[in-house]
Amino acid sequence: MLQCGILGAGHLPVIFAIVFFFNLGCTYLMAVFHDDVEPVFPYISASGDHRPESCFFSLLLNITSCLSMLVIYIRYQLIESLIRDSDQQISNLNFVSLILGLLGGFGMMVVANFQETAVIMVHLIAACICFGSGCLYMIVQSYITIKMYPLYTNKRIGYIRTAITAVSTISFITAITFGKLAANKYHEYYPDLPTPRPWNRRMWMPGYNLHVISAIFEWIMAISHILFVLSYSRDFEKIRVECSAAMLVNHLDHSPIFHRSQEELSQ
């Protein structure tokens, strides 16, 4: 991944998946070990809300967000190079998916740096942007994959991505719905108290069972996003990403003249 020459891109989705899974697993175990969250399905953000796991969570999630945006951009270029302007609808949808994917990646970065108990409103908005844009991105890319059959891809991968997208979208809606229901149930008993962050089953908290359902679907949604990106791995094996530098001057003390040709620079 760090080569400066020809880059085989098939491993990038795999690296993304490994880093993301490692982040989720390690922050969860650290949070449970320090007794910062309940072991029964806390929210992902709750696992990375207290030190020292919050430091680890932010570091790896920042790396993950950068990897996700890199993968999304390469996927965009892959489709553009493959169809070669032969299908304007696919090209337009591909650009829309690029914007949605980059927006989701930026939302993930904001989530990483604004913890749940630090700036709650920013955190919640960023989480909705991250997962919401992610689901929309998956919907558009699944449709593109199906549209690319049979000229550019097979039918099976379209079905796989569509199934993952359906699971993720349903999980997103369910997680938000049950999270709202849990908060409403809690505020029926404690109208003047803020929503628990994190929820704790050892204290009597109305709505805790609804919260667990919401958290379960949040984890399913996150894993679905990982699997969707991982499905790009076989496609990325068919491309190479070239990193190169083009000189604009013959001497580093000179100011660049952007309209110079390469032949003029070589003289």
Image (cartoon, helix red, strand yellow):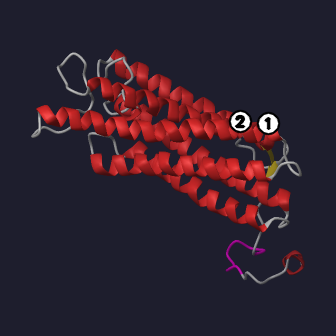
Look at the picture and state if 70 lies above or below 172: below
Residue 57 is drawn in which quadrant?
Answer: top left
Q: Left or right: 108 with respect to 177?
A: right
**Viewer-nearest residue: 218 or 73:** 218
Mark 2 is on which residue type? Ile
Which secondary structure lies at badge 2? helix
Mark 1 is on which residue type? Arg
Q: How many marks?
A: 2
Q: Which residue is mark 2?
A: 160
Q: Residue at x 49, y 23 (%)?
A: 25
Q: Main secondary structure of the magenta part?
A: loop
Look at the picture and state if 149 lies above or below 168: below
Q: Horizontal and vertical percent for residue 54?
A: 37, 33
- Furthest residue toward left: 192
For residue 119, say whether it is visible: no
**Viewer-nearest residue: 183 or 267:** 183
Q: Residue at x 47, y 23 (%)?
A: 26
Q: Which residues are magenta?
A: 249-256
Look at the picture and state if 180 lies above or below 122: above
Check contact, mark 1 vs mark 2: CB within 8 A: yes
**Viewer-nearest residue: 96 or 31:** 96
Look at the picture and state if 101 lies above or below 1: below
Q: Left or right: 86 with respect to 64?
A: right
Residue 255 sits inside the magenta stretch: yes
Q: Which residue is mark 1?
A: 156
Image quarter where the N terminus lies is: top right
Q: Residue at x 51, y 38 (%)?
A: 170
Image quarter where the C terminus lies is: bottom right
Q: Horizontal and vertical percent for residue 245?
A: 76, 62
Which secondary structure lies at badge 1? helix
Residue 4 is tagged as none
Q: Horizontal and vertical percent for residue 211?
A: 32, 29
